[in-house]
Amino acid sequence: MLQSAKERSMRIALVLLACTCFTVPAAPSFASGCMQVLESDVKIASMRAYAGIMAIAAANGWNYTPESIESGSRRHFEEMSLQLIAVGYEIVPVGAARPQCVVARN
């Protein structure tokens, strides 16, 4: 039962992430093939997805301490960042000089 609830929560989180990604208009850099995303945008998407996970957990009667929620949120953000990096995105810190993408044209 617990495993299926975790799997359900993960599926919902992935759907929320996909919805978040697809509802945001593509930045000009994405249109040119550049795959950079601001760290703050990843944080916002992660927080939204994690809030959905926590809402489902609360609806199922699960209670977590504030420390557990904070730790889980941090881990969720780190995992989401690693998944984006794994598929080729570059996560750019807010305030950092944003390097220009160079896209090879044939």
Image (cartoon, rainbow, N blue to C red):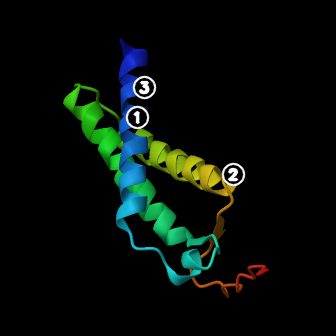
Disc sitting over residue 99 in the figure: none
Residue found 39% across the figure and 18% down from its top? 4
| Front residue (pair 9, 62) | 9
- Give percent across and percent down for residue 42: 50, 63
Residue at which label 2 appears: 86
Q: What secondary structure is marked by label 1?
A: helix
- Give percent across and percent down for residue 21: 43, 60
Tag 1 near tag 3, CB within 8 Å: yes
Residue found 52% across the figure and 53% down from its top? 77
Q: Quick check: 13 above or below 94?
A: above
Kind of residue at disc 1: Arg
Query: Where is residue 23, by image quadrant?
Result: bottom left
Q: What secondary structure is marked by label 3?
A: helix
Residue at which label 1 appears: 11
Name the residue at the front extreme: 106
Residue at which label 3 appears: 7
Q: Counting residues from the N terminus, which is met first, the one under dot 2 or under dot 3?
A: 3
Are there few (<14), some (14-19), or many (20+) residues within 10 Å of tag 2? few
Q: Counting residues from the N terminus, which is met first, the one under dot 2 or under dot 1?
A: 1
| Front residue (pair 55, 101) | 101
Q: Quick check: 62 above or below 29?
A: above
Q: CA distance from mark 2 to mark 1?
A: 19 Å
Kind of residue at disc 3: Glu
